[in-house]
Amino acid sequence: MTNTIFDIHHHGAEPRPCAINSIMAGEQLPEGNHMFSIGIHPWQTDRNDLDRLFESVHTAISDPRVVAIGETGIDRLRGGDLNLQTEIFNRHIDLAIQTGKPLIIHNVRASDIILPIIKNAGKGLKTIIHGFRGKPIEAQQLINAGAYISLGQYFNGDTAKMIPDNRLFAETDESTMTIDDIIETIATARLTSPQKIKEQIALNAELLGI
């Protein structure tokens, strides 16, 4: 793909340029020269066709427009049984390692489960925690485990300040804000310019092989 990435995770009816557009397992990839991620969302794990959904993910990743896997992960507030969510999460980790594609992680009150899993996966796994709103101590634990941290419309200002440049991403997710507006709020929190943030995000995506 030739588009520079500034928005690491976007949900919306229309795919956006310069973004990784998130598709839930079982949905068709839209037409057009955009970038996508695909995975079984934790909210889908209460379904009874998870094997079929996983096969659809496995098939879709052969499309060169699919540059990442996910979002997937663990959600303590919604979705199937936590053991089942963990099993599905691990299957996506195996797929991410096999393909070399980064894994976009949905983490709701589940760092205690996710942290040891991504630590044990080793350096072959590239992870991005999307929509992170937690405190600096939790962010540091995830960074120490090798994760990148993506900030969206809502984030902890102290956390935004402490994320190393080479571990930072930004996203729109489901926000009505533009990625430029979100990057501007992140830049303000980090006492830097939006342009520097955009340049760093593009570099980080390149270093991840996207």
Image (tube, grey):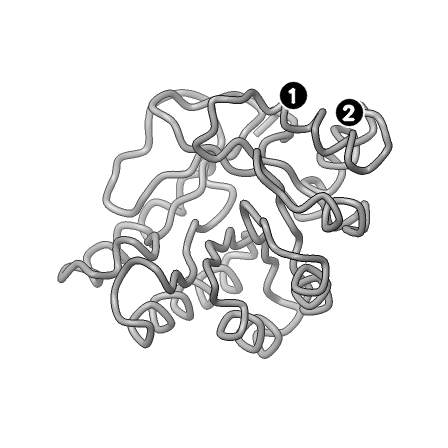
Quarter of the rendering occupied by the C terminus: top right
Q: Secondary structure at mark 2?
A: helix
Looking at this view, name the residue that lies furthest to the left: 48
Q: Is residue 6 toward the left or the right of residue 26 in the image?
A: right
Q: Nearer the viewer, residue 138 or 166?
A: 138
The three-letter code of the residue at mark 1 reads: Asp
Give percent across and percent down for residue 15.
42, 23
Q: Position of residue 48 (x, y in %)?
A: 13, 62
Counting from the top left corner in percent of width and height, residue 18 is at 58, 25
Measured Cα–Cα span from mark 1 to mark 2: 8 Å
| Circle 2 residues within 10 Å: few <14, some 14–19, many ≥20 | some
Q: In this picture, is 208 found above or below 108?
A: above
Q: As displayed, is residue 90 above or below residue 20?
A: below
Write down the quadrant of residue 3 in the picture: top right
The N terminus, quarter of image: top right
State the residue at coordinates (63%, 27%).
182
Which is more toward the observer, 75 or 165? Answer: 75
Looking at the image, which is closer to me, 132 or 114? 132
Marks 1 & 2, CB-CB < 8 Å contact: yes
Q: Dot 1 surroundings within 10 Å: few (below 14), some, or many (20 or more)?
A: some
Q: Which residue is mark 2?
A: 194
Disc 1 is placed on an element classified as: helix
User: What amino acid type is highlighted by mark number 2?
Assistant: Pro
Q: Based on the displayed image, in which of its 4 quarters is residue 92 positioned?
A: bottom left
- Residue 176 horizontal/vertical position (percent): 47, 22
Q: Residue at x 32, y 33 (%)?
A: 29
Residue 180 located left or right of residue 55: right
Q: Which mark is residue 160?
A: none
Name the residue: 81% across, 45% down. Answer: 165
Q: Which residue is located at x 72 percent, y 34 percent?
A: 186
In this rendering, the count of numbered labels is 2
- The residue wearing badge 1 is 180
